[in-house]
Image (cartoon, rainbow, N blue to C red):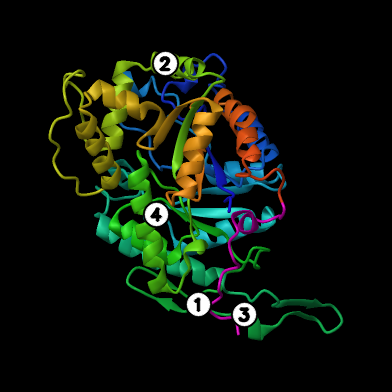
Amino acid sequence: MTLEMKLGLFLRPTGHHVAAWRDEAADAEGSFQHFLAMAQIAEDACFDMLFCADIATLWEGANDSLCRLGTITRIDPYTLLTAIGGQTRKIGVVCTGTPTYDQPFHVARRFASLDLVTGGRCGWNLVTSMQDSEARNFGSAEHLPKHLRYKRAREFAEVVRGLWDSWEPDAFIRDKKSALFFDPQKLHFLEHQGDYFSVKGPLNVPPSPQGHPIMVQAGASDEGRELAAETADVIFAAHTGLEDAKAFYADVKGRMTKYGRKPGQLKIMPGLNTFVGRTEDEAQEKFERLQDLIPPTVGVKMLSHYIGHDLTGLPEDGPLPDLPQKKAGNTTRTDLLVALARRENLSIRDLYKRVAGARGHYQIIGTPKTLCDMMQQWVEEGAADGFNIMPPSFPTGLTDFVTLVIPELRRRGLFRSEYTGATLRHHLGLPMPRRRFQR
């Protein structure tokens, strides 16, 4: 049986390659109209969702690298997707809200409201944040250790989901004759008392057509996998090879039974950075053109950022040095990049060029057949349920994927030609959420 894969579009101001803003076709300003145009292209192609990541800090670094980075500023993703949601009809909208530096009532209300505004097309990406510089923007000297971030995140998610269940679906009667607006038996107070939060409830937002927003996560550590197995509807994963992806897929889905969940209730969508051309040479030329635009200082600082250690001043053509163990931040991404460098004997320059477009996600360069063969293999062999597409540049990288790859996926019966439902939950083939209070 042919499996229909799920596709998300990972939005960034000018694209996912660090030098994308220098591309001649790029909108270096990153205006709202630019983002809206990308969203409309993705919706016309029947993508399941748009995804915006977020970080509550400026990329720290020397001025020479900082001033050459094209993604240093961006529109707040919640504001951006609220505006985009009002000008699209079907495509889902997902963005990050951190449980480390926010409050659950705020997050629950914000995303429940966006879910209503979009008619049930919203998702919340739960990420525990990455950088010490984020902590310093919220009154702390350094980032919480990972085990404490996930302990807080688990309780945070429990509170948010509980608040989303404040109202039963048919609670609102709105009977003008009897003057009864809602059935008081179908309103539920959360009364949560935990280690981190005390939240009475209820949420003052009615339920949406999809029950409540989709829960998305990206953690690959043991703590992240466990939290996703318990609570997530979607995982945006990062893998550099098929076997690693298959092992992750089997591990996370295998953890779900202890929480009374079935594997089909969670969609795993690895990031996929794509350079596609009508010929292999054309695809390679597109790749090399952007690679040649990377300022070396940006390459080193970008790698330092993602690996969590300052590599400034080290020989760029020398090997990655042995690194001390990180106490906080994205330790899983660090481990992934170090393993890649050791496995393929990459220099610092080699590694930053590998990270420049994909940031530790899978990168593929080739024809539509090359891409579709890879995508089909991953879905059929249990490595993915779909992909979070990361075009190297906007708009060119997206239009290349839509005009060259999507038709071939459809020819193989791997992707839809039209939407058959209105909510993000329906697009993803997910059941309505179980409500803790509903009789």
Q: Which mark is residue 249?
A: 4
Q: Position of residue 142 (x, y in %)?
A: 25, 48
Question: Quarter of the image containing the N terminus?
Answer: bottom right
* Amino acid type at image mark 4: Tyr
Q: Which residues are magenta?
A: 420-439
Question: Quarter of the image containing the C terminus?
Answer: bottom right
* Amino acid type at image mark 1: Leu
Reading the chain from its start, which is encountered first: label 2 or label 4? 4
* Amino acid type at image mark 2: Glu
Reading the chain from its start, which is encountered first: label 3 or label 2? 3
Quadrant in the picture for residue 255: bottom left
Residue 46 part of the magenta segment: no
* Amino acid type at image mark 3: Leu
Q: Which mark is residue 288?
A: 2
**Mark in front: 2 vs 1:** 2
- Disc 3 residue crowd, few under 14, some 14–19, many 20+, Cα 10 Å: some
Q: Residue at x 50, y 68 (%)?
A: 161
**Mark in front: 4 vs 1:** 4
Query: Relative to 379, is 374 above or below?
Result: above
Q: Position of residue 125 (x, y in %)?
A: 48, 52
Q: Which residue is mark 1?
A: 190
